[in-house]
Image: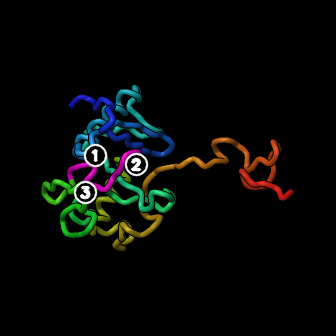
Amino acid sequence: MAPTEPTPLTWTLRLKHARTTVLLHIDPLQSLSSLKTELLRALRDTQPDGTLNGVALPTEAEEIVLGKPRDVHDLAQGWVRIGEGEEQLSNGTGKGKGKGKAREVDGVEESVKGAGLRDNAVVAFKWGASAAKSRKEREGEPDDEGLELDEEVEGDDEWDVQVPKYEDTYGVEGVVNGEAGDAEVGSVSPV
């Protein structure tokens, strides 16, 4: 499948892993498996050494796991796996909801829109050991200590996504009348 050419009807997805962001133009009704294929192709094209952040790229697109934010306004709250089975469907009935109903194949949401994503959505991706560990947790296999883990526990989802903060980007904590200080950005002193 050739990469999607941007049109007024295509969506842009921001796929994140660590500090890397990959922008892809996609059709909202495109399948999640074709999204993974396009992502892997983009990673291979931009990473000639075959690694991303020191980790070897996956050999197959099926090894990539996608996740959407629990709260789109606060990415620090973690990520929820998408497109991996019936337990991940939006309303628990095995079907999508609203106008973007998911086409279901073997209990898996197939379309990007059916997975609950929107235009300009942030999507986390991972592969390798962290994806395999999460798969064992989801299937109810015990971890090394013999405890069963719940994937919905905050902070236990193993997604390597680093979202830059204002201070990281601009290197200042606040500016008042052109001078750096402890005041909040855009604050106005009383006259």
Q: Quadrant of the C terminus?
A: bottom right
What is the span of residues highlighted in magenta in the rendered image? 110-120
Q: Residue furthest front?
A: 191
Residue 119 image position (x, y, % from top left): 37, 46
- Residue at label 1? 63
What residue lies at 30% left-to-right and 38% top-to-bottom?
A: 9
Secondary element under disc 3, as helix, strand or loop, is loop
Mark 2 crowdedness (10 Å alpha carbons): few <14, some 14-19, many ≥20: some
Q: Quadrant of the N terminus?
A: top left
What residue lies at 25% left-to-right and 66% top-to-bottom?
A: 87
Residue 1: which disc? none
Quadrant of residue 153 in the image?
Answer: bottom left
Q: CA distance from mark 2 to mark 1?
A: 21 Å
Mark positioned earlier in the residue sequence (2 or 3): 3
Indicate the amino acid at tag 3.
Answer: Glu
Q: Is residue 158 above or below residue 140?
A: above
Q: Is residue 182 magenta?
A: no
Colouring scheme applied when the structure was drawn: rainbow
Residue 149 image position (x, y, % from top left): 36, 70
Mark 1 crowdedness (10 Å alpha carbons): few <14, some 14-19, many ≥20: some
Q: Is residue 181 left or right of residue 10?
A: right
Residue 84: which disc? 3
- Residue at label 2? 121
Mark positioned earlier in the residue sequence (1 or 3): 1
Q: Is residue 183 left or right of residue 26?
A: right
Q: Nearer the viewer, residue 127 or 8?
A: 8
Q: Is residue 85 left or right of residue 127?
A: left
Secondary element under disc 1, as helix, strand or loop, is helix
Q: Nearer the viewer, residue 69 or 37?
A: 69
What kind of secondary structure does the magenta stretch mostly adopt?
A: loop
Indicate the amino acid at tag 1.
Answer: Glu
